[in-house]
Amino acid sequence: MKLERRDAGVCRSPFPIHEALVPKLLEAHASGPAPRPDPRDETVAHVLGTCAGYAYADVDTVAMMMARLGLERSACVCIGQTVDAMYIFSTAFLVQSHCGRVVILCYRGTEPANLGNWLGDADIGPDTLAWNGEPLGVHAGFYRNMRATRWAVLEELTHALEGRSLLDPSERVEYPLETLLITGHSLGAAMAVLFAISLASVATHRAIAARLQAVYTYGQPMTLVEPIPEAARRFGTRVFRHMLFRDVVPTLPPAHWGHFAHVGYEYRYTEGAWHRAETPVTQLEHIREIPQALLGSFATGKRRDAARFAARDHGPHHYIAALRPRGLVTEFGDYE
């Protein structure tokens, strides 16, 4: 098990991107007098999407980007576990605000050049997770990767709940954990959902589960096996799934490999804006459509526009660009 800790430090102008970010994260999903028409929060979506995108980098990069976003002097922890023969390539980042009130848990997705990572994605299983006494079928490869780092993640979250600094657990922060937000892109998105479900389904984790406010995912593949218990579907009201319109990954695994499904709210990016979908995306019918998606990435002109899927649209940088609120500086320090 690999564990690294970093202080995010502070940034110079033109950062931070979001002013007074901690209060915004605390308030975004707090219970109000009346439910909002759209429960998704634009700032949370951008912050967590950027974190999910840079989770493919190292702990220093994640810490720097979180400081640029507005979590200056935050504590950043990286937990990693690799077991090649078992297709385990599990990496989780935890970012604790300087005051201690907010923690973001972010899982890294499939590493493009890592064959073992891809083989783990193809190990659909299924496996079974106990949900309040009911069996819940889950994607075996995703579940195994989440479990590889789960207990180390829970230990860090327990420190945060006790008001300890994740930079140095022997030191205290001003406040204990109040708001937990979980995120990830691709495989990381699937692990984020599975961790949240496992957190809510185990009685000993209820104190941490009570702080969980939302799960924001990007380009998430289907993770749960039909039939899904009604309680798990209700839990999905905390899940906000984002998909670019031609991203093929949210339609996987293909239907002939098993009947998988999504839970939660689905948001699709079309015509330059995010729109809440009335119904979730359906499974890809057959694996042979995946090569077509790859070819769609290299097509040009009308042929590219007509392609149903384009694998390039799965890139985390495309998600970050689509999530950035208008008028804000980019994470690179310029305006687009």
Image (tube, rainbow, N blue to C red):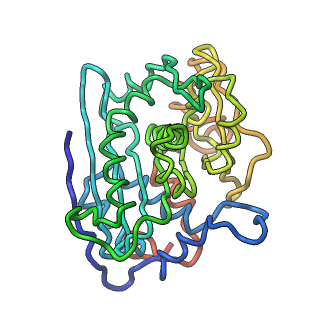
Q: How far from the left and from the top, in percent, is residue 11?
A: 31, 80
Return the residue found at the far top: 256
Question: Quadrant location of residue 146?
Answer: top left
Q: Going 44% across and 42% down the picture, which residue do you hit?
A: 188
Q: How far from the left and from the top, in percent, is residue 92?
A: 34, 47
Residue 10 as seen in the image, left or right of residue 22: left
Q: Going 68% across and 49% down the picture, which residue do you hit?
A: 237
Q: How far from the left and from the top, in percent, is residue 43?
A: 56, 69
Name the residue nearer the viewer: 20 or 197. Answer: 197
Quadrant including the N terminus: top left
Name the residue nearer the viewer: 70 or 282. Answer: 70
The answer to whether any part of residue 101 appears in the image is: yes
Q: Is residue 77 above or below residue 43?
A: above
Question: Quadrant location of residue 227?
Answer: top right
Residue 266 as seen in the image, left or right of residue 298: right
Q: Is residue 19 above or below residue 307?
A: below
Q: How far from the left and from the top, in percent, is residue 242?
A: 60, 49
Q: Going 37% across and 54% down the picture, which residue do you hit?
A: 157
Q: Is residue 235 above or below residue 212?
A: above
